[in-house]
Image (cartoon, rainbow, N blue to C red):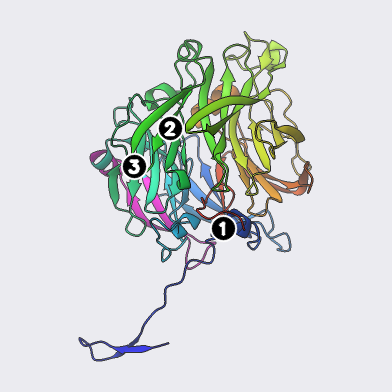
């Protein structure tokens, strides 16, 4: 390595060649060929608030003696954060040609507290099994610099770390997106320059090659923090729209209204191949019949449109088996609370948290999905067990993460503490499970993988080196 002389100290130092992080990939197909994941990071929540939440490290190496066990953890220094969605500081988007930052490293996890509005920056090096707290962004700093609170989703973009928030410091709206610096994690400010009619917030994602961002809707903090409000729900007051934005100018372009009967438009999963101009979004429930659904947005000429492509019906049930919130309906709603798309854009995974089912659809033709796999775990009525569990499971498949090669799917069972308590009033015992994917479609439960979190609750999973929902790509598949 070349040597240079420091004029100040008069000593030789090594110059450094900066290379892109080896976990960054130009295209989705190249990411599919990445090495298999060996660790997972999972947020663990104390629903009682008596002990701090934690980030737990799980061993995913089947050849390891500690397979499917906790091998590390870092506890937060505060109580009551309710850690939720989290993500990396950098990913394959750093290779995009318009705003390249190839020198950044996939090293830090940004972990927001949905209830506290605090953001933890965790360093996964030098020991990936023992992350450490690098920085804490306090809620008052977030509020002062963005006007937002209750940070929710993290995406690493080509120019910054993007995060969204459910609302304002008062608990009302609007919610929106804000930016942080890749390296210093200083808050740059709110992202929107003209939000138009957008008021409610939940998820966001983009089509980088088309300068388009989409955002979805749940509710303001005051609408969701105390649990599902039946009056707001029956009035069609929760989110039922997607918003289309110009990613470059940060201006609102169009509202795609699914109709007020479609309540809570949540997780966005755009196609990974940047040449494709479509994506999927899950809807928690319909006021018409308690069904849940998945909708496809797509670019038709120069106009973004949306249509329903999947509907999952509610299942009849004895009122005695239902929580008080549902007894008057005599049915279990599927409650689609998460979806995920494999990197080859072939399989869409749909979690039905109410009925306790994970569904797998072949979406090779995104306009005509085909159900090709299904596994039951937990559920409000079924409570389907697991070979490694001593009894019925509580909760159901909720957060879904897919490995880069598409061969493994990881699920956890907690939604949001106040909502958990409404739909599973007898309590939720946290767990994480793994399913194996058959080449032509189909799911098989891994009988050796069940992580029991006890009275703590498990939410989102992130895989070391990246996963199917962590990266976005600017280069097409070769």
Corner quadrant of residue 79: top left
Residue 52 showing in the rendered view: no
| Residue drawn at the location 30% of the way across and 45% of the way down | 138
Q: Position of residue 440 (x, y in %)?
A: 79, 45
- CA–CA distance between discs 3 and 1? 25 Å
Element type at mark 2: strand
Q: Position of residue 459 (x, y in %)?
A: 55, 40
Viewer-nearest of discs 1 and 2: 2
The circle drawn on residue 178 is 3
Query: Do labels 1 and 2 touch, CB within 8 Å?
Result: no
Q: Earlier in the sequence, mark 2 or mark 3?
A: 3
Viewer-nearest of discs 2 and 3: 2
The circle drawn on residue 464 is 1
Query: Do labels 2 and 3 touch, CB within 8 Å?
Result: no
As rendered, which of 462 and 66 lies closer to the eye? 462
Q: Residues within 10 Å of mark 3 (few under 14, many from 20)?
A: many
| Residue drawn at the location 59% of the way across and 54% of the way down | 28
Viewer-nearest of discs 3 and 1: 3
- CA–CA distance between discs 1 and 2? 31 Å
Q: Which residues are magenta?
A: 119-144
Residue marked by disc 2: 244
Element type at mark 3: strand
Q: Position of residue 99 (x, y in %)?
A: 38, 56
Q: Position of residue 424 (x, y in %)?
A: 61, 25
The image shows a total of numbered marks equal to 3
Seen in the picture, residue 100 relative to 4 is either above or below; the reply is above
């Amino acid at each position: 390595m070349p040597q240079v002389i420091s004029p100040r100290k008069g000593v030789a130092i090594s110059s450094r060649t900066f290379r892109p992080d080896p976990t960054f990939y130009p295209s989705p197909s190249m990411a599919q060929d990445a090495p298999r994941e060996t660790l997972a990071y999972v947020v663990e929540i104390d629903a009682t608030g008596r002990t701090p939440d934690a980030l737990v490290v799980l061993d995913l190496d089947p050849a390891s003696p500690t397979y499917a066990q906790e091998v590390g953890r870092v506890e937060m220094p505060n109580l009551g954060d309710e850690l939720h969605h989290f993500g990396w500081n950098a990913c394959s988007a750093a290779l995009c040609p318009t705003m390249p930052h190839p020198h950044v490293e996939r090293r830090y996890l940004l972990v927001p507290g949905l209830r506290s509005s605090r953001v933890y920056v965790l360093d996964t090096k030098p020991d990936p099994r023992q992350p450490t707290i690098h920085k804490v962004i306090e809620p008052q700093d977030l509020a002062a610099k963005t006007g937002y609170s209750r940070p929710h989703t993290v995406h690493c973009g080509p120019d910054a770390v993007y995060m969204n928030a459910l609302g304002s410091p008062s608990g009302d709206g609007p919610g929106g997106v804000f930016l942080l610096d890749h390296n210093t994690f200083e808050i740059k400010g709110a992202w929107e320059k003209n939000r138009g009619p957008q008021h409610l917030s939940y998820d966001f994602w983009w089509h980088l090659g088309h300068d388009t961002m989409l955002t979805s809707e749940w509710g303001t903090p005051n609408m969701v923090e105390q649990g599902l409000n039946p009056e707001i729900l029956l009035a069609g007051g929760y989110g039922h729209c997607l918003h289309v934005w110009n990613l470059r100018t940060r201006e609102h372009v169009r509202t795609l209204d699914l109709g007020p009967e479609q309540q809570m438009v949540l997780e966005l999963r755009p196609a990974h191949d940047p040449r494709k101009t479509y994506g999927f979004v899950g809807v928690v429930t319909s006021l018409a019949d308690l069904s849940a659904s998945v909708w496809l947005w797509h670019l038709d000429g120069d106009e973004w449109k949306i249509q329903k492509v999947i509907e999952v019906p509610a299942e009849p049930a004895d009122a005695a088996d239902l929580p008080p919130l549902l007894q008057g309906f005599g049915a279990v709603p599927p409650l689609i609370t998460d979806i995920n798309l494999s990197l080859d854009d072939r399989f869409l995974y749909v979690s039905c948290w109410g009925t306790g089912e994970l569904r797998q659809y072949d979406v090779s033709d995104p306009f005509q999905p085909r159900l090709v796999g299904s596994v039951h775990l937990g559920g409000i009525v079924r409570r389907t067990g697991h070979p490694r569990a001593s009894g019925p499971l509580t909760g159901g498949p909720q957060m879904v993460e897919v490995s880069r090669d598409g061969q493994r799917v990881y699920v956890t069972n907690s939604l949001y503490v106040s909502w958990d308590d409404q739909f599973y009033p007898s309590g939720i015992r946290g767990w994480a499970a793994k399913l194996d994917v058959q080449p032509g479609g189909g799911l098989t439960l891994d009988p050796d993988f069940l992580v029991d979190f006890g009275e703590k609750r498990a939410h989102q999973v992130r895989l070391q080196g990246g996963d199917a929902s962590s990266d976005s790509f600017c280069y097409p598949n070769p």
